[in-house]
Amino acid sequence: MSATLRANVSPIDTPLTSLQPRPDAASAFTLACSWFAAGRRVDMRELAAELGVSRATLHRWLGRRDHLLAEVLWAETSRVFDNVTFTGRGALGIADAIGSFVSTVNSSAAFRTFLQREPERALRLLTTKASVVQSRTIAQLTDLLSAEISAGRLTTPLPTPDLAYILVRLAESFIYTDLITGDEPDAAKAHAATQSLLT
């Protein structure tokens, strides 16, 4: 192609791929979250291929697969928390909120798909110190309980972090029931158990 012809090429003729923003850690995480929400397995090889980057680059951005999944799960958990009101009604409000939280998680098709497809990994990432999900959930619940206690709407003989830990474990018991005992998860039981514990 001559210099004259190259100069006359319209920007419209430029391939669309060259106009798209380059992938980065944020776009990689967003894509992983969208795959999880759609019930698709978050596979590092497939994710790297979709983004057009090497697996080494993807690992540098997002860490190992378990770390990425933990952050994706926490993003989903945070969204549930954002839609649940804990404060202002003492023990009953907290029981309602725990029940609502458990119900929302149990009705999430993406979450249930992940539990069924990778049960051992799911329990390790969600219920142990192997990831950030449980510790961040306990910390957030501790803050919310502290606000109720400070306002005089809730009393407890336990240190607040201990109470938060117990409530998180209680909620987990009625989210992962099918994996633990084979029974169906039951948000109503989570509500009743929380109310019984706090009143």
Image (cartoon, rainbow, N blue to C red):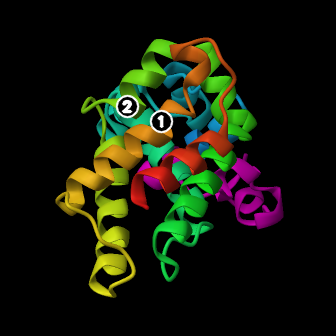
User: Which amino acid, by three-letter code, is at mark 1?
Assistant: Glu
Disc ID at residue 127: 2
Please state the horizontal and vertical placement of residue 167, each as a whole percent of the image.
39, 48
Residue nearer the viewer, 154 or 114: 154
Please state the horizontal and vertical placement of residue 123, each as a whole percent of the image.
43, 23
Within the image, what quadrant is residue 187 found in?
A: top right
| Callout in the foreground (2, 1) | 1
In reply to whether residue 17 is colored magenta, the answer given is yes
Residue nearer the viewer, 156 or 187: 156
The answer to whether residue 10 is visible is: no
Say what secondary structure mark 1 lies in: helix
Q: Which residue is mark 1?
A: 172
Instruction: Indicate which disc, 2 or 1, sits on the residue closer to the N terminus.
Output: 2
Magenta stretch?
1-29
Please state the horizontal and vertical placement of residue 168, each as a whole percent of the image.
40, 45
Which residue sits at x=22%, y=51%?
162
Q: CA distance from mark 2 to mark 1?
A: 8 Å
| Image marks 2 and 1: residues in contact by CB distance under 8 Å | yes
